[in-house]
Image (cartoon, rainbow, N blue to C red):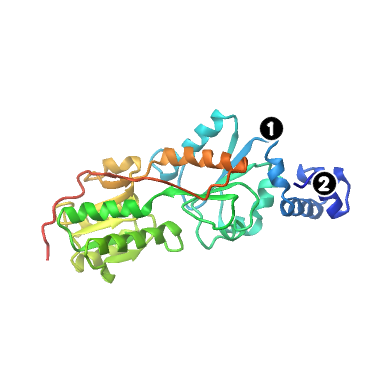
Amino acid sequence: MATIKDIANRLGVSVSTVSKGLNGASDISDELRQMVLDTAVEMGYSTKRSKKVENRKLCIFIENMNYETIDEFGYDIVLGFKQNAFRRKWDVDILPITPAFQEEEKYDTFLLKNGYCGAFLMGLALHDSWIKQLENTTMPTVLLDNFISGNPNVCYLGTDSYEGIAMAVNHLVNLGHKNIAFLNGSLYSLVSDQRQEAFENAMAAASLPVQKDLTAYGYYVSDSAKYHVPGFLAAGATAVVCGNDLIAKGVIDECTKRGFRVPEDVSVVGFDDISIAATFDPPLTTIRQERNELGRCAYDILNSLIHHIPISKTLLRPKLIERESTARCAHRD
């Protein structure tokens, strides 16, 4: 395993210069500091550094996800992670990031130069530059709803979308629905792709066709509904499965706006069970993700990776929460 001396020998510089580069000293050039960091990452020094008792910092990187208030999806995940980390005397930084930030900063060197032992990444898209970099990262990393194959330093964490969507479809089928629409979340998202496949599988298992005019990708926001619900209603949908609870809220509002009652005319099922789902009108039937447990698991997995215990995937089980937004099908033509 690489040492500071090994890095110094590789670069032909002094041990003190390498130490300054790793610790962010101001009396060496930015170019030399970056060279030290890049070489340290290449030689695997980050893994050794993460063992230091005094260096107990973790980072949560968040993109395209709200997390600051209790009503937002990411809140309980972040809380669960911090609860487990603080209990074991780790400091946790939370950094919102953008695609531009990922283009400017190399993942491994950013963690190394800021003293992070590992990171938990939430909300990244499949085309983000860090996703590609994670194929070869040496830094312990947990990814929410994204998977990197072949790298023992990276673990996928999520809720079983296949089981969750199957629960939603089966619930509606048991209520007599056949014309079931699916309003998914964003394109270029692994979890959206999984839920699309899960919907198609569940419909096939129920011997129901997946109608092209009853499925669509939107975004994980309420406004998605206004672009797709009119078409669903015109095509005779009696129920809509939604990629998350915010989409479901938009579907309910759009149905109501167009004179369709929920659940008498159209049943609606969400996904996530955010805290405000029970306050919708009507209260939302949804698939619960145990988000606090996701956060706690993320820390536990990251701690395992830091101690060289490779974990590939961890999936939590979803749960169907039945409320008033679903009812027996009235067989609307």
Which is more toward the observer, 31 or 54? 54
Side of 303 relative to 297 (left or right) = right
Residue plotted at (73% across, 54% down): 42
Q: CA distance from mark 1 to mark 2?
A: 20 Å
The amino acid sitting under disc 2 is: Val
Query: SS of the residue at dot 2?
Result: helix
The amino acid sitting under disc 1 is: Val
Say which mark, if any, is on residue 175: none
| Residue 115 in sight | yes
Residue at which label 2 appears: 18
| Residue 28 in sight | no
Residue 9 lies, in percent from the top left, at 86, 51
Residue 173 lies, in percent from the top left, at 19, 56
Residue 50 lies, in percent from the top left, at 67, 40
Side of 56 relative to 191 (left or right) = right
Residue plotted at (25% across, 46% down): 284
Tell me if residue 235 comes above or below residue 329 in the rendering.
Answer: below
Residue at which label 1 appears: 53
Q: Which quarter of the rendering shows the C terminus?
A: bottom left
N-term-proximal mark, 1 vs 2:
2
Side of 272 relative to 16 (left or right) = left
